[in-house]
Image (cartoon, rainbow, N blue to C red):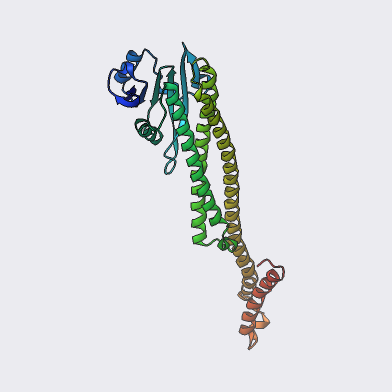
Amino acid sequence: MLTAFASQDGQIRRVTEPLRDAMWIDVLSATPDELELVSRETGLEIPTEAAIDEIESSSRLRTHKDVLYLSMPLVRQPETNPSTISIGFVLTPDRLITVRFAPSRVFDHFIEELCGGQVEANSSAHILTGLLEAIVDRQADALEQVRTELETVSHRIFCEDMANASGRKREDKMLRETLVTLGRVGDLVSHIRESQVGAGRIVPYLETATEAWLPKELHGRMHTLRRDIASLNDFDTHLNDKLQFLLDATLGFINIAQNNVMKVLTVVSVVGIPPVLVAGIYGMNFKFMPEYDWALGYPFGLSMIVFTALIPLAIFRWRNWI
């Protein structure tokens, strides 16, 4: 699908044709015919999905015949099933082409603001700068969501009920759910970090490569973008440390619950050994056992069984093991 925007009467409006007059062409999951059309109308090479997915810096940031070819990963669906999609930018002084292969709410929201006149779009560089600002702002929102989720998990783990956790079924379920939540949050943080690295590389490269024609008013916005990305990187590191701490704490509580279960099984097995020994002795079919002839032999045997079971319990209690 092709969506083109051109400046008309001082405002950015959607246009259908001719594409050669468009300031911004957004290429979304385009067919080969559409890609050929864009390339023919603009005279620019449109990168393929394989080229955009390349991870080396030389492939993501390059200049060919005064045309900038940029690419970066973008976080998608951070609230439900976080993943990353690769997006590409083809930038010239008078035109911007964005290439993507999946829908993005960041782009949809930016297009609404652009057509509503809320975004300055005097040139292709203005549009790309606005897009990068929208992407960084979306990353900040996702990190705020991560912080909220981690605070919820922290309150759940370090509540008073967990101080008396004993491996019950309800506690086991809560700990499993916590591990799943932490895994999903960790996946989201990883995707955000990857997107931040991509944006952090594009901004300084863009400033350097477009020094001859980048509008002066964008230098301040680029500087602000660099600072925002740096602050998000610091915040991302803090959240990653907290995530690791909560993961270690959750695994620690799981180990404590397992140890409590093993302790109960150990106590039961140790307490049961002496009575079994006594019952085994008096269950042997020897001819001469004096206790068989006692009138109180049976109560004596039962008393021995109970007494030998209480001795280990008393020892465990004395050592504060139970």
Residue 235 location, quadrant:
top right
Which residue is at the front of the view, 157 or 7?
7
Instruction: Give the image location of residue 9, x and y in percent.
Output: 32, 23
Query: In the rendered view of the protein, which quadrant contains the N terminus?
Result: top left
Q: How many marks?
A: 0
Answer yes or no: is residue 190 visible.
Answer: yes
Residue 81 location, quadrant:
top left
Above or below 213: residue 318: below
Answer yes or no: is residue 1 visible.
Answer: no
Which residue is at the front of the view, 246 or 25?
25
Residue at horizontal 55 percent and vertical 23 percent from the top? 204
Query: In the rendered view of the protein, which quadrant contains the C terminus?
Result: bottom right
Instruction: Give the image location of residue 131, x and y in percent.
Output: 44, 29
Instruction: Give the image location of residue 237, x and y in percent.
Output: 59, 39
Residue 320 as seen in the image, left or right of residue 37: right
Q: Residue furthest right?
A: 319
Q: Residue furthest top?
A: 65
Instruction: Give the image location of residue 265, x and y in percent.
Output: 59, 63
Above or below 13: residue 37: above
Q: Residue furthest front?
A: 9
Q: Residue furthest bottom?
A: 295
Residue 270 as seen in the image, left or right of residue 213: right
Residue at horizontal 50 percent and vertical 56 percent from the top? 174
Residue 287 location, quadrant:
bottom right
